[in-house]
Structures are given as structure tokens and as C-alpha cells.
Image (cartoon, rainbow, N blue to C red):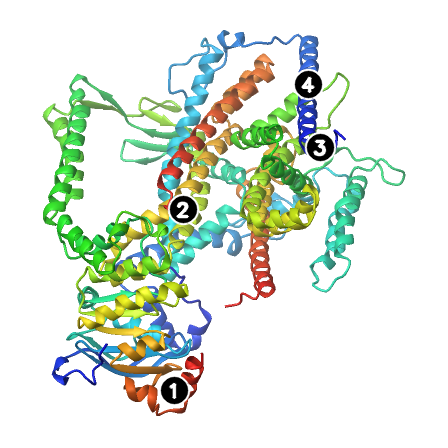
Amino acid sequence: MIWKDRRYRALLFQALALIGVIAFSVFLVHNALENLARRGIATGFDFLGSTAGFGIIMHLVDYTEASSYGRAFVVGLLNTLLVSAVGIVFSTLIGFSVGLARLSSNWLVARLAVAYVEIVRNVPLLLQLFFWYFATLIPLPTPRQSLGWGEAIFLNNRGLYVPAPIVEPGFAAVPWALIAALGGVVVLLRWNRRRFDATGRTLPVRSISAALLVGCPLAAFGIAGAPVTWQFPELRGFNFTGGCVVIPEFIALLLALSAYTAAFIAEIVRAGIQSVGPGQIDAAYSLGLKPAQTLRRIVIPQALRVIVPPLTSQYLNLTKNSSLAVAIAYPDLVSVFMGTVLNQTGQAVEVIAITMGVYLVISLGISLLMNRYNRRVALVER
Amino acid sequence: MKNSETRPPSAASDQPMIQMAGVHKWFGEFHVLKDINLTVRRAERVVVCGPSGSGKSTMIRCINRLEDHQGGRIVVDGVELTDNLKNIEQIRREVGMVFQQFNLFPHLTVLENLCLAPIWVRKTPRSEAESIAMKYLERVRIPEQAGKYPGQLSGGQQQRVAIARSLCMNPKIMLFDEPTSALDPEMIKEVLDVIVSLAEEGMTMVVVTHEMGFARTMADRMVFMDSGEIAEENTTREFFDQPRSERTRSFLNQILSH
Amino acid sequence: MDSRLPAAFPSILASPVTLIHWMRRNLFSSPLQIVLTLLALWIVYWSVLPFIRWALVEATWRGESRGDCVAEGACWVFIRARMGQFLYGFYPEPERWRVNVTFLLPGALGAPLFLPGFKRKLGLAALLLFVYPVVATLLLAGGIPGLPRVETSLWGGLTLTLVVAGVGIVASFPLGIVLALGRRSELPVIRALATAFIEFVRGVPLITILFMASVMLPMFLPAGVNFDKLLRALVGVTLFAAAYMAEVVRGGLQAIPGGQYEAAASLGLGYWKSMVLVVLPQALRVVIPGIVNTFIGLFKDTTLVLIVGLFDLLGIVQAATTDPNWLGYTKEGYVFAGFVFWIFCFGMSRYSVHLEGRFRVDDKENRGLVR
């Protein structure tokens, strides 16, 4: 009986599944094309060259209303990457601090950390975003009554105004000085390592490296005659001109993403450190290692193996969550492309496909890198 | 294997290596160590036995300050154990400990496990540390495993590496907290053999164990703990042949019945 | 390094001596700790105290209209005045009893499931799983004699949040299990399809899925077939949650030793029987925390439906803050909504911890591994 044979049944089952999926897809595509034609909406990716005709309040590259939709896409993408990158940095700093605080022997500090995590984790991110934006940043005073520090930094409901640096020709020396300092640090570390292996003595390399990395560029800066002028924001009429402005939408999104993700990172850090058995610490102490040495050489290497995979997950979550920008009109990729551009062109399929494609590339790329890292650092067992 | 009865008495020196006087310890409300008085002299081998929960592990963990004590005094090689960090670090350099769960560092090779403390605590140059490590690996009879990771070794091999790791710091005292309790039966002998050979070289040691045959041949003195107190303390021969207290007798009956 | 949380309060309140002793050990044990404690106290002073003053001490609780809010603190009158809308959305007032019944019913019917001694658990669960959704839909949507029709566009507030979350949870659970089984299947086509679906859905933000469901779904259907706006969002949320649920279940399936599969097969159980009777019960139990976490995430994600035009609790509160009669009370609105969400999510996470503990005890007793 052919249909009882396991292999043939398996093949038949798969063939049916495949046919089903393909038939379903054809059905969908056919309908889509018909509906689009009926409404007179174009297909294809030519629209990327057409004029956008709308402004964007924050653009890291040049953009005007005469720019193309393709350019608008790039602007949105850069805004997404910017808020995600800065968010990752902030949330990591806050998350590690809170995670370590959670393990502190100080009762008050530990409890505060627990309260932070349990509150922030259990309230929706969108709500926290609204809170930061509508309840905190929008009610800030108008430009004429800004909160100010010195005559340089101003905070109002249009944003955070800071002085903008204008570099003059002599500034080129500074990045070169930094590169030279980096090279010097690498050489120093290598030499110190060799000396330590041979004699057991070491120099305070961390302080020296820090001094080099900060001092050399500073020295170059001074020698070149301080080749930077600052353009201060000035109040003209009802608003500020000059200087650099960080829009409140960016600030709100950054704060919400960082605070929210930090709560999850804190738990990951805590679990990672606690995964290192107390026996490891006992063994290290009984060999005479100091607590700082134990932390650096025994606890952290093992804890990191447990921390890094879920940590990268959280970074990806943060990047995807940045799409909530559309709710407060921060011009990220979703807001600009899947919002405005889609509305104007009506080419939903192409626009949504491109947007999803971007996020997929980011996600899968990070996942691949992470798998490679995991395989490399896995503890070797029988 | 000779114990102290047949060895000339001058073999043990006068200054005690470990002195515990009137030591008390509480875990919260629970009184886990009650008036512990114990003296261990140089080159002496003391075995501590007793039922689970009697405080044996806690007691020896107090000796290298893995646990603190709330009452009494503990003096190790002339240095008193207090909250003074310098004293604690000094004592930990002189006292080696071997754990029931081995506690090898899984992310380092066997050789790196052994070299870690000499390099970072005694500031030994790496090449010197490595030759010391190989010497002790040969001592415990597994020099070929130097490049392997702990996860690749058997339980008996891991425990021998743990012993070698402690020896690399050149301790004056070795503490063993149930070193064979987590091992499969066929691997217990190889570890006990190493401990016995250490004892023959004159190492001062305190061993918490259930292996009574091993204790009988190796120990100078036996200590029996029950419910946080030292219920009986005696030379080995008298401990096994003429136990003084009833508790000791019933414990020995249970342990030695198979 | 002490990785245990320091001792809790009650026992130390026995006398002033123990209190001071406790404070010295847990708050002031070293110079660094003193600095940290002072820093922590400053944080409490700067953030927690003003909040308590605003929300409780100086707040206005009674009144009818805006004019009653004269104090410095929060104006909870705003919440009380709009409570009906926050809870039921635009659901007509005379029909609101239907919503109450719909949400109290599973509580009443499902309570026996939590009693350890109850006999007919499987039957009751089946009743809840298959009969209740039909009853709930009829109650809420109406359209049958005696229950006038209420369009889904009128559903809103906490009602809508619970509908989206409930449907999402109930529908994504079996779908996630099927996807997880598919991903671990030995048939390459099935595995490829399942993996592709899961990786695709997990790689994109929920917003894009919702947009896709809202905007593209009508386009993919033959002309004339109309899709209710709520239904589109439900499809999007369910598919999204199912992909994450699939990964959680897959983790559980991987944790089951191969010997279990082999034992079931050698007893003559076919694929589906061994899955349902042997593997899944064990796998699901192992990943209960992961499952509840996914549910909690789904509950929080329901707020995103406001972006596609539905008025869940957050959406309704958001809209209420723009009412000309009640301008300037955004803080009160968001604090209220945040509190409601927090109660649900925190409650679910506590329940998950409780479940974990219970199942672990059961396991130990069954296998005699109590140490």
C-alpha cells in the first residue's frame, strides 16, 4: 500500500504543503494585482526616484522637500540607527549598574534596583514613551522662558539647544593624535604583558593608557591653537537660531527605550552573575585571590558567557522598538517611509516590503554574528 | 603508613598551626558551631567526621575565613583571624583548600587553573609558575592533561587537579572538605592515594570525610562532631577501639556496618 | 561577594539594638556603602517623595468637573469622570452589562481549575477553550435576538485591551506549538516553512506586522470581501505572538531527553500521540516561565493597536487627554493607565513564579529526589 509507506507519506505530505503554500501565495498576489490596478496605484520601485514633497524635522544628511523618496528612506534609516545606537549605549550603562545594584549587600540599594526593574518591566513601552513625551517634554516652557544653564544650553518644549562646534583647518591634528595615542597604547600593553610573563611585575597600564588617550588629543588641540569655535544658540524672536538642537521627540524616544531596555538588561546581568556558582568564588578566595581579582578573572568571564546571548536579543528588541517613533512623530524609518511615503504613493506592498527587509537584515545579521561568538566561547566539555 | 603513635614525638613541633578556642557561630538564629576547641600541630593529620548537618564543613571553612565566626578566637600559624583583610589574605596564602565539588575554573585549561593564583597573588613570573604547575601535575600523576579543560576530565582527575592547584601556592596547611563524596566509587582510591602521599611528606592537614578505612590508616587524631559541638576527640586507635561517648559509638556502628 | 539579598525587615524590629545592628551591617558596613546609602536616600527624596505627595497627599479625589481640582496635586476627578469610557470605550451604556458578564464568566467558570481536588478538570478546560469564545463573541458583538448588535468600532478601553490580549493568548498558544513542532520536524519542507515564518516574524517590529495586516490584508482579498478593523489587528497580534511562543516551546522540546521520544516510539505511539501524551506535557511544564513571559509581553504589546486606529485602554486615555474640558491632565491619565497595566503584568509574573515553584515540588515528590 503506497500510502501507508512512511517515506511516501512524508513526501506526499510535504508536496501537499508546498503546493498549498504556493497556491495560497498565487491567490494573494493575483488579488493584490487586481485590486491595485483597479485603484490606479502603480507597482514597482520607480517611485523611489520621485520627489518627496514633504519636510523632515531631523535629518543627518542633506534633505529638502525637493529630495527624492529614496533620500527620505535614507534619512529615516539613519534616524533609526542613531536612536538605536545611542539607546543601546545608555541602556547598557544603566542596565549593568542596576543589575549590579540588585546584587549589592546594601539593603536600600538592592531594593531600589528591584523596584525599578519590577515597575519598568511591567508597564508597556508605548505608555512610557507617551509619558516621557506628552507628560514631561511637551509641558516644558516655551523658548522665551527656557530652562538655561549658563548662556550655552537651553531646554524648552522645542528641544535641547546646545552650542555647535565649528572646526577650523587646524583641527585635523586631533584625530591623528588620537590614532597615535591608540597605537602607543597597543604597544604599551604588549610590552607590559611580556614583561609581566617574564618577571611578574606590571606597570599601572590602565591609568597610563587613559592618560595617553585623553592627553595626546588634548595636547594636539592646545598646540594647534584651539581650532574650534562655538556657535551658541541665540534667542531671536520666538525661537532659537544657531547652535545644535536635539528635538524632544528624539529625547523622549531615547529616554523611554533606554529606561525600558535597561530593566531587562539588569535582570540578564543579575542572572548571569548568579549563574557562577558560589563554589567558584570559594575556590578563588581560598587560593588567596582578592575580591577584585576574583571578579575580573573568574566571575565576569563565566558570567559573560551567560549574559551575551540574551543581551544581544535585547539590543535587537531595542532596535525594533524604536519603530514606536511613529506614535510621537519622530522621523524614523517607519514614521517617514511606512508612514508618510506610503500615504503619499499608496504603494503599500513595496514600502512595507522594503521596511521589513531592512529590519530583517539587521536582525538576521546580528543573529549570525552572535551564533559565531557563542560557538567560539562555549565552555569545552566532553 | 605510620601514624603518630609509632613516630617519634619530636616530629611534631611545639607551636600549633591551628588554634580554635571557644569558637561559636550562628547562621541567623541557628547556632551552628558551639564552643569549638581544637588545636592542630605542625605535620599533624586530623580527620573530622560526623553526621550531616553537624557543622564539620562550616568549621573548617572558618579556618580560611570562607565563613566568619561570632565568638571565640581562631589563630592560624600565629596570625589571628579577624575582619582584618590583610590577615585574611595572608592566611589564605598559607592555607590550601580542596572542595567536595572540585570547583575548578571551567573557562581555563588545567594548566591555567594551576598558574592563576601563583601569577596573580604571589606575582610569580609565568614561566616559573608553569614549571611549578607541571611539577605538581606530575605529582598527582596526570601531567598529560595540562592542556585540557576541566569539562573534559573525569571526576577523579578533576579532584586531583584541584589538589595540585592548591599545592601550587605552597601552603603550610591543607584543608579537605569531603574530597571524595562527589566521586564515583572507582575513582575514590586514586584521590585518597594522593592525599595519603601528601600526608607522608609531612603536610599539616584537616580532612572532613566519611571514608573510615582511609581515616584509620592516615589520621593522627580523630574528631567527631555532632550538632555543632565536638562530641569526641581522641587518638585514632582509641577512637576506633574504645570510643568514649554513646553518640560516637552509634555513629561508628552505622558507618562501619558495611 | 555576597550575592544573596540581605535579610528582610520583620525580625529586626524586635528592639532598637537589633535595628541599629541591622542598619550597620546592611546599610553602613563600609565607607563605600555609606556613600551608596546616602545616594540612594537622595534618589528616594528626589523622586519617590514628590510623587507620593503629588499622587496621594495633595491630590483631589472628589468632584464633578474640572473646577473641583484646585489642589496642587493630581486631579483624580478626571479619571473618575471618564471611568466609564476608560473601561468600556464607546460601548453603549445600557449594554455594558454584557461586557461585565463576558469577563466575569471565565473567572467564575475557571475557578474550579485552581482547586487541587477538582475531578473534571479536562472537561472544564475544554468547555472554556471551545465553548466560551463563541459565547463571548455573541455577548460582545450581539446580532442575535435579544442582544442588539454593537459594532467593533465601538469597543474600546480596558474591554478592548482584554479582548485583544485574550484572543491573542488563546490563539497564539496552539499555533505556537504547531510552529515549534514544525520547526523540529524531520521533513525538510515543513521545517523550512516553519523556520522561515518564525524568523521572519521575529525579525521585524510588531508595528510593521500590524501595518501589514491593516493596510495589506484588504488588498490581498478578493474585491468585496471586507475585513473588520479589529479582526485585522487580532490576526497581526496572534501571528506575532505565535512566532515568539514557538521559540519558547521549542526550547522546552529541546530540553526533553531523547530517551523520552524513543520510549514513546517503542511503546507503539505514533508521532501525534507521543507528542500529545508524552513530550508536550513535559516540555510545556519546563518552559512555563517563558510562556507566561510571552503572555506578559503580548499584554503590553496590545497598546500598539492604537497606532492602527483602535482605542485600547492607552488609546482611550490618550484621546481623553485631548478633550477640551480636561486639558492638562496627561500625567494623571498615564499614571492611571500605567497602574492598570502594571497590576495585570506584575500579577501574571508573580503567578508564574508561583507555578514554577509548585511544579518543581511536584517533580521532586514524583521522582523521590528530595534532598
- In the displayed structure, does residue A273 sit left or right of residue A332? left
Contact (CB < 8 A) between labels 2 and 3? no
Give the image quarter of residue B256: bottom left
Q: Circle 2 sits on which residue? A: A306
Amino acid type shown at disc 3: Asp
Mark 3 vs 4: CB contact within 8 A: no
Q: In the rendered structure, which amino acid carries the disc numbered 2?
A: Val
Select label 2 or label 4 by which is in front: 2
x 39%, y 38%: residue: A375
Is residue C206 visible to the viewer in this orientation of the structure?
A: yes
Q: Earlier in the sequence, mark 3 or mark 4?
A: 3
C5 in relation to A42, above or below: below
Q: Earlier in the sequence, mark 2 or mark 4?
A: 4
- Within 10 Å of disc 4 (Cα), the crowding (few <14, some 14-19, many 20+) is some
Mark 3 surroundings: few (<14), some (14-19) or many (≥20) residues within 10 A:
few
Image quarter of the N terminus of chain A: top right
Task: Please state the chain letter of the residue tagged with numbered disc 4 in the rendered image.
Answer: A
Q: Is residue C219 above or below residue C293?
A: above
Q: Nearer the viewer, residue B41 or B156?
A: B156
Q: Which label number is shown at residue A28?
A: 4
Q: Which mark is residue B248?
A: 1
The picture places residue B180, in percent across and down from the top left corner, at 36, 67
Q: Which is closer to the viewer, label 2 or label 3?
A: 3
For mark 2, name the chain.
A
Q: Quadrant of residue C140?
A: top right
Horizontal side, residue A212 vs residue C164: left or right: left
Q: Give coordinates of residue C119: x percent, y percent.
A: 76, 61
Mark identifier at residue A5:
3
